[in-house]
Amino acid sequence: MRTFTIGDRTLDESSPEFPALLADAYEQRLRPMCMCKDPAVPMYIARLEDQYLIKRMPLSGRDHDPACPSYEPPYELSGLGPLIGNAIQIDANGKADLKLDFSLTKRGPRSAANGPAEPSEPSIRSEPRKLSLRAMLHYLWEAGELTEWRSTWAGRRGWGRVRNSLLNAAAQMTARGGPLSDMLFVPEVFHPEDKDGIASRRASTLKNVQATGSGPRKLMMIVAEVKEFSAAREGQRIVVRHMPFPLMIEEGAWRRLAARYETELELWRSSEAFHLIVIATFGVSTAGIASVEEVALMVVNEHWLPFEDIHELRLLEKLSHLKRKSVKGLRFNLPREAPIVSVTLPEQKPAPTAMFIVPASAGDEFEHALADMIEARPEIASWIWRVAEGEMPRLP
């Protein structure tokens, strides 16, 4: 049970007075201080539907005591490590200032000869200095704590909660001199009784990317769940849930997208339980048509946890029944040939445990990089599943 100091009061979160204190602190924009360590660790209050929750500030998870529920595994074990201090910098207010590797403006007409739908991934040894579109999605997912899971949360994470988590996370970030939340659109869950209100709020959010004539214009990012892809007269439509109009994508960009994300698309189509998440930069033409500029995809399971292949899926399924917390590692800018932690068990005793999956195709370079990664964090126990050697080892 966590204890917090908020203003001039110190309470643990089981106190009957705590919910009312949290609501008042949210309105006054007070910052809770987690008392798990000395000095205390600053956090922020998020509103999720009718609940107020205390969340970690960006990249502050390692500052908490390992026994604290707010503790986060070392980011060096995932693709987040190379981005810290480069693409992601923490400012004086504790917010994350981001450097983006994609444009949020459009200049002139799109050419059929345009480059790939998203910048190519860096090599295994590169030190990325900016967030690719896929890395942006991964960072939002991680900062929104959507990579975390306990069995007691089953049935309590739907698109409404995912959306609020993403927007609350974005509110703690800046990019290009402004709040990231001003650049991000996440569709609301559609409720027929609030149809007009939803439409009004959507129009207000999108008005800045509505083209009014020639010349450069602003783009926004959208994060949404794909419902289906369908053919248009020219190009393809990306139909997303909870939105009354599709995202249009040119045929050449669609072919590149389908080739690059062939694995994600194959996994998504294999089960109705899975969700496909799209992140894209887009603008709205003078005719009111939303068109994609750059795009990336991510497949998640029924609990909205990302996974890369069937082996990770099996591991997540095994862990999903445990009450202890698991944290999914994400790749960010790293290519598939680079090792990353698949899942971390931060509450494992006597030490947090990092779980790695070595693909059957892994060679010496992969094994050396994995050994270096494990050696660099001796306080973290390791669990390794080498797929080429057979079935999944016993869980820790």
Image (cartoon, helix red, strand yellow):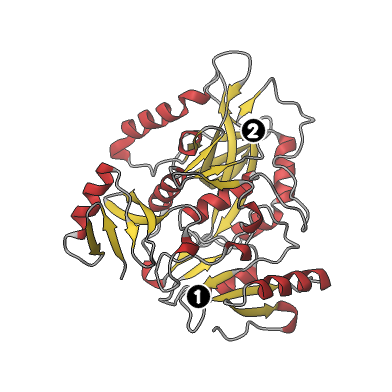
Residue wearing tag 2: 103
Label 2 CA crowd tier, 10 Å (few <14, some 14–19, many 20+)? few
* Residue positioned most to the top: 213
**What is the quadrant of the N terminus in the image?**
bottom left
Q: Is residue 271 left or right of residue 337?
A: left
Q: Amino acid under label 1?
A: Leu
Q: Position of residue 54 (x, y in %)?
A: 34, 56
* Residue positioned most to the left: 16
Query: Looking at the rendered structure, which numbered label has been put on residue 34?
Result: none
Q: Position of residue 316 (x, y in %)?
A: 54, 71
Q: Position of residue 222 (x, y in %)?
A: 53, 39
Q: Is residue 30 left or right of residue 296?
A: left
* Residue 302 visible in the displayed image: no
- For the residues labelled 2 and 1, the Cα–Cα distance comes to 38 Å
Q: Nearer the viewer, mark 2 or mark 1?
A: 2
The residue under the point 70% across, 83% down is 390
Q: Is residue 297 left or right of residue 119?
A: left
Residue wearing tag 1: 319
Q: Position of residue 261 (x, y in %)?
A: 69, 52
* Residue positioned most to the right: 364
* Residue 92 visible in the displayed image: yes
Q: Quadrant of residue 248?
A: top right
Q: Amino acid under label 2?
A: Ser
Considering depth in this image, is 210 or 60 the residue closer to the camera?
A: 60
Label 1 CA crowd tier, 10 Å (few <14, some 14–19, many 20+)? some
Q: Earlier in the sequence, mark 2 or mark 1?
A: 2
Q: Quadrant of residue 191?
A: top left
The residue under the point 75% across, 36% down is 252
The residue under the point 62% across, 66% down is 77
Q: Is residue 114 left or right of residue 219?
A: right
The residue under the point 71% across, 54% down is 262
Q: Is residue 216 above or below residue 202?
A: above
